[in-house]
Amino acid sequence: MTLRIGLIGAGTHGMRYLRHAKNDVPGMEPVMLCNRNAENAEANAQEIDCDFTTNPAELIEKVDAVIVCTPPSSHFELGKMVLDSGKPLLIEKPFTGTLPEAKLLHAENSGSPIPLMLAQTLRWNPVLQQAALLWERLGEVHHIRVVQRLEPTTLAWQRDKSVTVGGSVLLTGVHMIDTVRFLTDKEFIDVDHWQDNIQNPVVEDFFLTRATLDDGCKVSMEVSKYTQSRTCLLEAVGTKGSLEADYLYGGITLKIGSDVENFDIDASAPTLPGVLESWLNCALGYCPPPVTSLDGLKSLEVIDGCYASGQSRSVVKL
C-alpha cells in the first residue's frame, strides 16, 4: 500500500521532508504541499512533482496523511484540523506553541485510534541511538549535561513578534528535554533557568537550565544560538562510568574504570528518512507512534517551567 501524504508548511525544513519522502521512503508518495505564498508553493511543487495549494483544509481533504511543519504558533490549530479529519498526523517539534494548547491537543488525541507522531528527530540520530544502547553500562546516572551552540537564526518568523511564541527554549531546548527523557525514561521535577537576548531582540537566543529528574539525577542544559560555530554534546556520569557523545560531528567515548572505548559513529546521516519510515509504519497500523502526544505534552511542561523560572528568578517545581 502507498501512503499519499501532504505537507503543510513547505518552507526550507518542510521541503526536506518531501525530498526524503519522495526519494528515500518506499511506500510513501508526496501528492500535495501547502505554502501560504502561492508563487513559492508552485515552485516547490514543481520540484517534487506534486500538486500545491495555499489552503490547509484543501490539502487535508485530498491526502491520506498529513505532515505539519509550520511555526509552533500554528501547530494547535492545524493539528486539530488533521485529527478532526481522522487522518494520521506527523507534527514537527515542539508539539504546540504553548502548554495550554499541548494539553488540549493531547486530550483530543488521547485514546484516539488516529496515529499522531511527534517529529523529535534527535531520537533517530545514530550517535544518540548508540548512547541509548550504552546507557545501562554507566550504572546509576547522577549528572547529564547537554549543549547545543548554533549560528543565529536566518528565519524571519523567529524574529517576528506576531508569529513566534518562543525562542531557543521552545525551538531548540525541546530537543534536549526530549533526549534526556528518551535516554533515562525519567521525568523532570524542577527547573532553575536563566536566559538572555544576545543577538535576537525578539526572543531568547541563549539559556542555561539546571534541572532535577524524578530519580534525583541532575541535568544541565545550554543553548547558545548567537555564535558562528556549531557544537552538540551530551555527557553523562554514572556510578560505573561516564560517556561523552558528539552528536553533530560524530563519535562516543565511554570510560569504565581505566578502560576507554571509542565508538566511531558518523552523525552526518539525515534523521528524516528514519522519522518518515517510523511514521509510515504507524500510519499503516503496524506499530504505535514512538513519540506520542504525551511526550510532546511532557516537554511543553518543562518548557513552560523554564520560562516561569526565568521570569521569577527562582526554582520552579513541575
Image: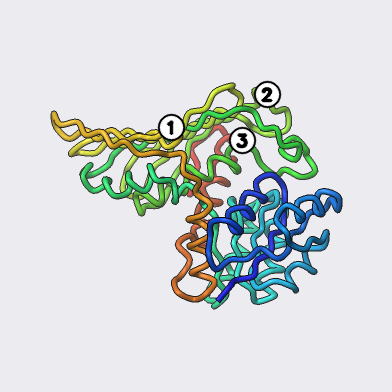
Image position, residue 62 (x, y; %): 74, 73
Which label is found at residue 199? 2
Q: Residue at x 23, y 48 (%)?
A: 136
Element type where label 3 sits in the image: helix
Amino acid type of the residue tagged 1 in the rendering? Tyr
Q: Which residue is mark 3?
A: 311
> Image quadrant of residue 54?
bottom right
- Which circle's residue, 2 or 3, is located before the other in the chain? 2
Quick check: 191 above or below 9?
Answer: above
Element type where label 2 sits in the image: loop
Which label is found at residue 82? none
Element type where label 1 sits in the image: loop
Q: Looking at the image, which is closer to me, 30 or 195?
A: 30
Q: Residue at x 68, y 67 (%)?
A: 80
Amino acid type of the residue tagged 3 in the rendering? Gln
Quick check: 170 above or below 9?
Answer: above
Q: Which residue is mark 1?
A: 249
Horizontal side of 305 relative to 144 (left or right) equals: right
**Circles 2, 3 touching at the beta carbon (< 8 Å):** no
- Which circle's residue, 1 or 2, is located before the other in the chain? 2
Horizontal side of 273 relative to 79 (left or right) equals: left
Instruction: Report the quarter where the N terminus lies.
Output: bottom right
Amino acid type of the residue tagged 2 in the rendering? Gln
> Image quadrant of residue 144?
top left
Q: Is residue 217 visible?
A: yes
Image position, residue 128 (x, y; %): 38, 44
Quick check: 6 above or below 225?
Answer: below
Marks 2/3: CA distance?
20 Å
Badge 1: residue crowd in 10 Å (few <14, some 14–19, many ≥20): some
